[in-house]
Image (cartoon, grey):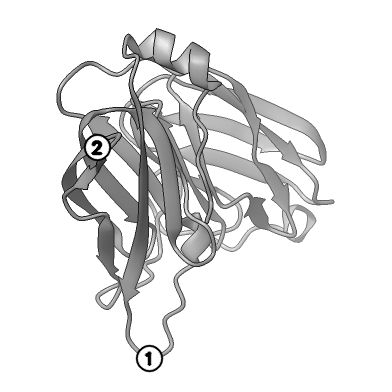
């Protein structure tokens, strides 16, 4: 089972102002139809405290590369205030952008190299695309809580956190999100830790370019 360690135990508990620790183990399952294959280990799980304000996880520096006209990794989660570098590993140009409220940006057209960096301040889901290649997409989750991580390939997750009441939220790109309220104590967990995501209504949709218009065929030199 994949265990999600948030901070070193002693430092974390001091930051949280709670001397009791508890463990939450759970699993995310999928409802799918024939031919659907959600990427299970791109399922993000996070805990929203219901009793007290959560401590902040320090902002950091992350990377999402463009490689073979894809984003690597495809999904990342970062603390609010973090920066992400977008190096271009392709021998062609990319123009990364997002129109997501609170985190709108446009990196402009750039070729192979170290790329450009963007800072993500506002918590929420950020959909990122390339203005040259309509099939390129990625997702950045800017997290308001320090309690988060991705499941393993079997959908398992585990958190070591201060005892208390939490809302457990699971998200996957093909399934949206679902949640369950739990109470975590050293003696055990009250509430459902099995979360089910429904992918059966998922339909891949073509997004617009950064001007809100259909994509035009790019020039050969940039494609």
In the image, 101 versus 40, the foreground residue is 40
The residue indicated by pointer 1 is 34
In the image, 75 versus 55, the foreground residue is 55
Q: Is residue 138 above or below residue 82?
A: below
The residue indicated by pointer 2 is 184
In the image, 5 versus 175, the foreground residue is 5
> For the residue labelled by badge 2, is the local secondary structure a helix, a strand or a loop?
strand
- Residue 209 percent coordinates (x, y): 45, 50
Residue 53 shows in the view = yes
- Residue 31 percent coordinates (x, y): 29, 77
Earlier sequence position, callout 2 versus callout 1: 1
> For the residue labelled by badge 1, is the local secondary structure a helix, a strand or a loop?
loop
- Residue 172 percent coordinates (x, y): 38, 58
Residue at the extreme bottom: 34
Density class for disc 2 (Cα within 10 Å; few <14, some 14-19, many ≥20) is many
User: Is 105 left or right of 177, judged from the image as shown?
Assistant: right
Residue at 75%, 42% (x, y): give it.
88
Density class for disc 1 (Cα within 10 Å; few <14, some 14-19, many ≥20) is few
- Residue 91 percent coordinates (x, y): 84, 51
Residue 81 shows in the view = no
Residue at 26%, 65% (x, y): give it.
196
User: Is 33 left or right of 191, judged from the image as shown?
Assistant: right
User: Is 60 left or right of 94, judged from the image as shown?
Assistant: left
Q: Is residue 161 above or below residue 55?
A: below
Find the distance from the CA under tag 2 to the CA under tag 1.
37 Å
Residue at 73%, 46% (x, y): give it.
93
Residue at 64%, 58% (x, y): give it.
218
């Amino acid at each position: 089972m994949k265990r999600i360690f948030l901070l070193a135990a002693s430092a974390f508990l001091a930051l949280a102002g709670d001397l009791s620790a508890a463990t939450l183990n759970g699993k995310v399952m999928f409802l799918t139809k024939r031919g659907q294959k959600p990427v299970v280990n791109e399922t993000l799980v996070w805990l929203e405290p219901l009793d007290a304000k959560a401590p902040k996880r320090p902002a950091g520096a992350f990377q999402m590369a463009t490689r073979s006209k894809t984003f690597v990794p495809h999904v990342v989660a970062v603390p609010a205030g973090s920066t992400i570098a977008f190096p271009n590993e392709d021998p062609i140009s990319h123009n990364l952008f997002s129109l997501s409220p609170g985190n709108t940006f446009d990196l402009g057209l750039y070729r192979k190299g170290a790329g450009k960096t963007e800072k993500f301040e506002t918590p929420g889901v950020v959909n990122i695309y390339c203005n040259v290649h309509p099939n390129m997409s990625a997702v950045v989750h800017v997290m308001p809580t320090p309690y988060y991580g991705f499941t393993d390939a079997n959908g398992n997750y585990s958190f070591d956190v201060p005892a208390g009441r939490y809302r457990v939220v699971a998200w996957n790109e093909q399934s949206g999100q679902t949640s369950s309220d739990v109470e975590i104590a050293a003696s055990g967990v009250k509430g459902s830790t099995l979360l089910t995501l429904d992918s059966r209504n998922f339909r891949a949709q073509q997004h617009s370019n950064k001007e809100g218009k259909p994509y035009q065929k790019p020039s050969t030199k940039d494609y």
